[in-house]
Image (cartoon, grey):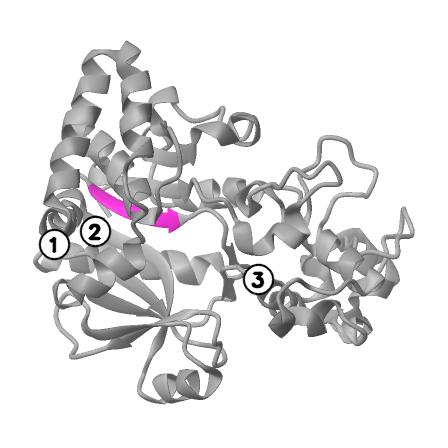
Amino acid sequence: MQCERIWSLVLAGGEGSRLRALTTLPSGTSIPKQFCSFISERTLLEEAVTRAKAFTPPAQTCVVVAADHRRWWAPPLAGLPKENVIAQPCNRGTAIGILYPLLHILARDPQSRLVILPSDHYVRDEETLQRAVRAAAELLDQGSGAPILLGLEPEEPDPELGYIVPGEPGIDGGSIRRFVEKPPAHMASQIIIEGGLWNAFIIVTTGQGLLELFEQRYPQILRQMRSAVATLAREPASAHNLQRWYARLPQIDFSRDVLEASSASLRVVRVPPCGWSDLGTPKRIADTLRRLEPFEFHTPRASSTGAPLNLARQFAELAQQRLPWRDSQDSRYFGPHSHSIVAGGLPLTSYTTRDTPLTSLTMRREQTSSSS
């Protein structure tokens, strides 16, 4: 990978609405999950920025955020150049959340290549994912520059995930026959038999190749966005005009409204299982915790001040209280049988630290070593 042309774009502007039962404080404030931790003391956003830095230096590592989330993103992103933290005036869907920072990056480097990474995912085996990203970048150089999606080999049929069904292989990865979003369980099993892959929403692309997708689907919005970004660069005081215009934009979903409509222009690279999870629902959190070993946990103590909200701890506390989940299809994870949920082979509600006994989930590496 030629680092001088590779940029990382970490997507951190989402609201995390599907996990609000876990991420809402007693005050009623809901913290988007990218600003929460999972099995370490670092937030998922910090983990994602570290992931991005495996491919790009800080000067070419960008993060798109929402302006009204500043209290959560400003401290962890303080180490990045100021111009690399690109704040949207408001959230208008994932497509706008990619187009806006893309135009900022292209203004600085018209020949840029990008690795696009979500900020709120967990990856157990980072090295496997890194190898796949590098392989995709090499294929990008050999092919037409069309965007390449990373498709993960499924570890199980999961009806809560999106799938990519590959077509014929080529020198720049396989073609894509179709996308399938959150199919029923029986259909997910059939898709896997057909060679279907989990869609991790990780993309390796040239900046211009990605821009062409927007040109094909939303040319008017692209022209307006170009003008708005150029005006903002010349006249920073015009930010209030951008905010008013931004609020009038439609909500556009990048997967559904851009990728699915452009599947013939896309490629896919297969990624071996790497312990990936989008942590999108309580079920995904429970499934991920079950697969981990005790030594892999390092969550902060319950009394830690300034520590980010921890998803594993929150999940365990709700499980112990046996609180009903708002979505009936997930009630079994917080319902009467929640005591059977285990992580690293141990029940979530009985796993405590050496230092501070808790009825919730607090796991540390030193506990494992002291008990062995």
Q: Is residue 310 above or below residue 296?
A: above
Q: Which residue is mark 1?
A: 145
The type of residue carrying mark 3 is Thr
Magenta segment main secondary structure: strand
How many discs appear? 3
- Residue 370 or 255: which is nearer the viewer? 255
| Position in image of residue 201 (x %, y %) | 35, 58
Q: Is residue 111 visible?
A: no
Asked if labels 1 and 2 touch by Cβ distance under 8 angstroms, the answer is yes
Q: CB atoms at circles 2 and 3 under 8 Å apart?
A: no
Residue 4 location in percent, x, y? 22, 35
| Label disc, if present, on residue 281 of the rendered structure | 3
Q: Element at badge 3? A: loop
Q: Position of residue 147 (x, y in %)?
A: 19, 56
Q: CB under 8 Å between callouts 1 and 3?
A: no
Q: Nearer the viewer, residue 133 or 283?
A: 283
- Going from N to C along the chain, the mark reached first, 2 or 1, is 1
Find the distance from the CA under tag 2 to the CA under tag 1.
7 Å
Element type at marker 1? loop
User: Could you tell whether 65 is left or right of 333 in the image?
Assistant: left
Disc nearest the viewer among 2 and 3? 3
Per the model, the C-alpha gap separating discs 1 and 3 is 34 Å
Q: Which residues are magenta?
A: 113-117
Quadrant housing the C terminus? bottom right
Q: Quadrant of residue 80?
A: top left
In percent of width and height, residue 69 lies at 51, 31
Give the side of residue 168 with respect to residue 250, left or right. Answer: left
Residue 205 badge: 2
